[in-house]
Amino acid sequence: MTWLTVALVLVAAAAGLLRWRRPAWYWMTFGVTLAALRVLVRYGSVMDACGLTVPAPRWRLTLARMTNRPVPGPRAPRILRLRVTRTGLVLRLKLRPGQDAFDVAASCDRLRHSFALYGVTSREVRSGVVELRMTGYDVLKRVQMPARVDTRPMRVPVALRE
């Protein structure tokens, strides 16, 4: 039992050290799993709380009443794809009939807070499909100079701090 406790303490210490010194490495080792689980588990209730659900169609309500089944609840946008990036998650949503991409854009701050991520932005990929880009950590906290600086005229080094 003690070796298990020691191993858990070592993993927690390594996670804390990674989060402090190398946020990108922490994100790729621990943060992705935790954030993806948080998004997938809380998705329906968060979308309902943000007002991004639509009521079930009338034919489903009628069918439920005729067959003595429970009345279907509101429907959230369908998740088409969840993709992991170096800085966060990309969630592609298929909007239900009656939903608008502007509603999703207006609720980005609430989604950021509910999913406990650093930032959420949205863009409409095509009609009825919205892409949510979720940033897992502050990417501008430790900006580093490029390894090679281009010294040709009219070239500005990117990521330069003071």
Image (spheres, rainbow, N blue to C red):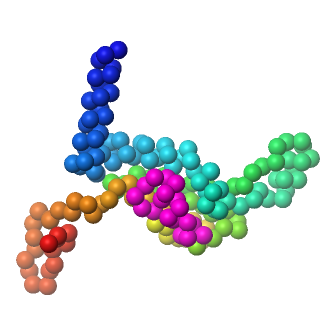
The x, y position of residue 19, in whole percent, is: 28, 46
The x, y position of residue 113, in whole percent, is: 49, 57
Which residue corresponds to the image point at 55% horizontal and 66% vertical from the top-left? 107
**Residue 149 falls left or right of residue 135:** left
Which residue corresponds to the image point at 53% horizontal and 61% vertical from the top-left? 110
Which residue corresponds to the image point at 67% horizontal and 59% vertical from the top-left? 53
- Residue range highlighted in magenta: 103-120
**Residue at the farthest right position:** 66
The rendered magenta stretch, by its main secondary structure, is classed as helix
**Residue 1 falls left or right of residue 43:** left
Is 75 located above or below residue 160 in the figure? Answer: above
Which quarter of the figure has residue 142? bottom left
**Residue 129 falls left or right of residue 64:** left
Pick whichever, 153 or 52, lies toward us. Answer: 52
The x, y position of residue 70, in whole percent, is: 82, 43
Pick whichever, 20 or 52, lies toward us. Answer: 20
Magenta stretch: includes residue 112:
yes
Is 94 located above or below residue 65 in the figure? Answer: below
Would you say residue 137 is visible in this rendering? yes
